[in-house]
Image (spheres, rainbow, N blue to C red):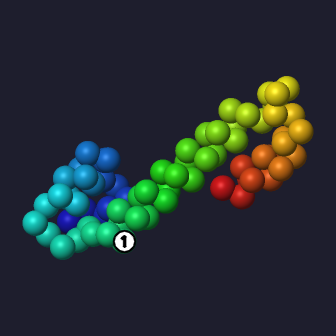
Amino acid sequence: MKCLIRLSVKDFCQAVASENVTPGGGSVSAMSGAMAASLALMVLRVTIGKAKFSEFDLENISLAQSL
């Protein structure tokens, strides 16, 4: 099997659905966590600099840097 990190999302999903025992729950959990972190970073980037959320800019910038 190819290195999992190099698989497209489609190929990764097909590999998970295959008869093989790997990739399994650990790989799926890691992918889900990475996607959740990416989505959180997107939200931070969208809100930083917006007047409506300006009181949170410093905290959001710090959080974005840690992701």
Which of the 4 image quadrants contains residue 22? bottom left
Judge by depth and name the residue closer to the eye, 30 or 4.
Answer: 30
67 lies left or right of 53 = left
Which percent across, then down, holds residue 36?
52, 52
Q: Could you tell me which quadrant the N terminus lies in?
A: bottom left
Quick one: which residue is furthest to the left in this view?
Answer: 19
Judge by depth and name the residue closer to the eye, 27 or 1.
Answer: 27
- At 25% from the left edge and 52% from the top edge, which residue is drawn? 13
Q: Could you tell me which quadrant the C terminus lies in?
A: bottom right
Determine which residue is flagged by label 1: 26
46 lies above or below 57: above
Which of the 4 image quadrants contains residue 3? bottom left
65 lies left or right of 2 = right
Label 1 crowd bin: few (<14), some (14–19), many (20+), radius 10 Å: few
Q: Amino acid at mark 1?
A: Gly
40 lies left or right of 23 = right
Quick one: which residue is furthest to the top in this view?
Answer: 51
- At 73% from the left edge and 34% from the top edge, which residue is drawn? 47
- Count of labels in the image: 1
SS at mark 1?
helix
Which percent across, then down, holds residue 39?
55, 44
- At 70% from the left edge and 41% from the top edge, which residue is drawn? 44
Which percent across, then down, holds residue 45?
69, 37
45 lies left or right of 23 = right
Which percent across, then down, holds residue 23?
26, 68
Judge by depth and name the residue closer to the eye, 1 or 58.
Answer: 58
Which of the 4 image quadrants contains residue 56? top right
